[in-house]
Image: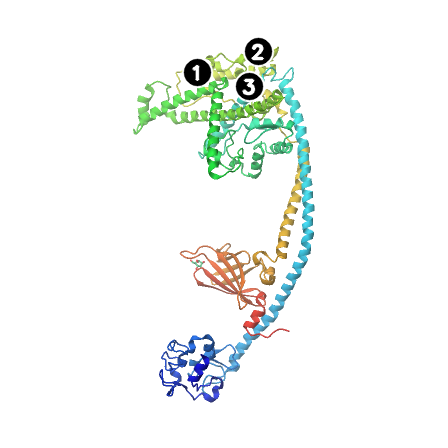
Amino acid sequence: MQSNRKNHLVIVLLLNSLGATFAQLLECPFGWGDNEKLIQIPPDRINDGYCDCPTSGLDETETNACSGSANWPGIHADTASTSKYHCPGQAQLHISLSKVQDGICDCCSGADEAPGVCQDICDEVLAAERQEMERRLHAFREGSLIRKKELASYSELREKTALDLEVERSRIKSLESRLNEAKDQLAQWKIKRLEQRLEQIKERTAKIATDPETGILNGLSTDELGWMIVHACQTAGEMQTMYPLEERDAKSSASSKGTDSTTCVPLRLAGLDAGLIWESTTYKPKSMDEAVDKILLAELLDFNVQHTGSPAWTQQSLDKANTLNDKSQRRRLTEVEPENDEGDDEDDIDDDRKPTKETSRNSSKQAKKSEQEERRLQLEQLILGQPYSLSRVALRQKAEKVIAVIDAMKETAEGDTNMTEDIEESGNSGPGPVIDPVSLPFIRNKLDDRSRVIQTGLDYAVSAKVLMDELDASNPPNLRAVLQSLLIGTLIHGNLSSLQFWELLANVVPELRIVDGESKTCKAHITCPPTTIRRNSIGIPSTEILKAAEEACIGLLQQAQQSCVVEDGEDALSGDIPNGYGGFYVLSGRDEFDLFHTILGDLTLVDNDEAKNERDELNARISTFETELESLQSKIADMADLVDGGKDGSHGPDGELYSMKNSCHSIESGKYTYKLCLNDSATQSEGGPGGTHLGKWDGASVEDDGTRVWKWTNGAKCWNGPKRSATVHVTCGIENQVTSADEPETCRYVFEMESPIACDESYRLKYGLPTLE
Ligand code: MAN
């Protein structure tokens, strides 16, 4: 096409010899067909938007007017560039032909116009350009030296680090083995301590339980021991909830979830004292004699010594307790899962069911749950049928009756503004207790509380019965000794008093039981004065317990008389539900004057100073090793990253970004200060701390002309617009410095920056700089 055009065109204007041809005009064939006839085009008609040379289009290379011509130069970038005029001495300046001889001086020498039209101002113009060129050259010279130096030290560092890495890796191994050694030592220490402790507990428990003179469990059958344990748990449950419930209600009426427990923890702890753990899902007992997990037992006992307020009793509860900082977050713990969704919680300590496929998991889980719920209800019924529960059942029935009356009174009064009057007139006329209407809410709350106490006692008892049944089924050879030790442990950990113990005896040992029928009344339930029996010449209860019971009876009888007065008065309730109402007493645990305080006190888990010091020392060594190991591991990770050349190219080409990998660069612009941090965030602030997030580091790239482009994306969302983002264009400079900041579109920020890292060959070529020696 080029040669074709040459045949048709006569270009009188010779671009490369301007001086001689300025007077001449562009000539081209006239119209579309007659090549013989030429026309001359004056400069003001060149690129004026009208096509004078339709066959060649040469007069309109810069406009689209001749774009239909077969040989229009405007359609070819290469030919278009040849029709630019290059100002002599100004390598960067190319002007279009239309600017030639247009009466305006574009070249500093005036070479684009006829001689004499322009003055030669190249000395001044080129001075600025030359100065800029010199600045660039200087920056390039210095910057590229810095760059080379940094790249060299980077590659040197990498080589060195590769060698060091091997050394550090071998240090890890030795550190790990020292750490494991220290952990082993601690484990051995714990086991030794466990053995000492168990031995001690065993000896003392045996004495308390079966000393021929003073033993408190002499003469009891294994069946009775089992029920004593269940009821001891019931009592512990009732006591545990009594106070926390009231405290909690006083604080807030927020959900009770997580604050109470339905696992008989005292029994679990008693198990640990006896060297026995119940497996967390099947509740199968595992004892020390079977040489199970001594270390787990040791860990649990050791943990509990140190955390008396939040003990653990299985591996799961230990793990959980160790990770839980906030003890108040502890979940409800159940021996048999309740039907509500708390059992679903992955966090449930006693729930380590294996994960299965979602659907079958759900249905089998549900089946398991209803099975468990059924079992729980059966056990609950069984426990409610025991003599010890009679007063609980009686109170429940009484409470139901009272609540029914209260509800009936409310219903009658519903809608009426003068409710009190209404109740007075109608509410108390029917059967049931007489209730002072002012006390209604108070009485209801009290009864609710009392019922809750009873329920928690039952939950504990159910939990204990599950464990007892499993223990029974496992039929250990020393069942009696195990039960004795479990009962003593439950008394200790459940904080039961000698009086409560006597109450348990009086309900569990048939010969000591109060004649049925009488026991349902308030007076008869208080077994005062205490009776005794003899089995094979063994006195039950033991002399000491009997003495304690006799002493306690004096006070207890007075209390009973008071509550009986209340009941005798035709169930009149006026504001208080006394302890003993319905025959049910919530007895507080032992105090320092209690017989049990003396005889069981020795067995409470305490830590002596010597043991504490030994453990602290070992723990300190372990944590020193762990800290060392951790910092060595992170050092190794950094070293490996360096040797590998940075993750995802984070060190940039040739590692040029390594030396500045965590650096930040700031610039003030308008009212803002911008801070750009590599491998981190970019922010915009108005002087103060914090600021607007412009984005997270999104990596670096290099453009063809050598410009480095750094990006931060996903910043704070712009009101009614995109998420903020920032881009930095880095070009060659001696120092790392941000030179400009701009927001060309709302919330899109663009910065210019100089850095030696961009002083490379592509920069030299871009500005036509000379090569450096
Ligand atoms: C703030 C700053 C500005 C931005 C506006 C958009 O004022 O981040 O840079 O243009 O928000 O609302």
Q: Quadrant of residue 138?
A: bottom right
Q: Identity of the amino acid at label 3?
A: Leu
N-terminal-most mark, 2 or 1: 2
**Residue at the spot of label 2:** 533
Q: Distance between the residues labelled 2 and 1?
A: 31 Å
Q: Mark 3 points at which residue?
A: 499
Q: Nearer the viewer, residue 35 or 216?
A: 35
Q: Is residue 613 visible?
A: no
Q: In which quarter of the image is the C terminus?
A: bottom right
- x and y percentages locating residue 529 in the rendered image: 53, 12
Nearest to the observer: residue 649 or residue 633: 649
The residue pinned by badge 1 equals 565
**CA separation in Å, label 2 and label 3:** 17 Å
Secondary structure at numbered mark 2? strand
538 in relation to 668, above or below: above
Disc 1 versus disc 3: distance between alpha carbons?
A: 23 Å
Q: Which of marks 1 and 3 is in front?
A: 3
Q: In which quarter of the image is residue 425?
A: top left
Instruction: Check contact, mark 1 vs mark 3: CB within 8 A.
Output: no
Local packing at callout 1 (Cα closer than 10 Å; few below 14, some 14-19, many 20+) is few
Amino acid carrying mark 1 in the image: Val
Q: Position of residue 688 (x, y in %)?
A: 50, 56
Q: Is mark 1 on a helix, strand or loop?
A: helix
Under circle 3, the secondary element is helix
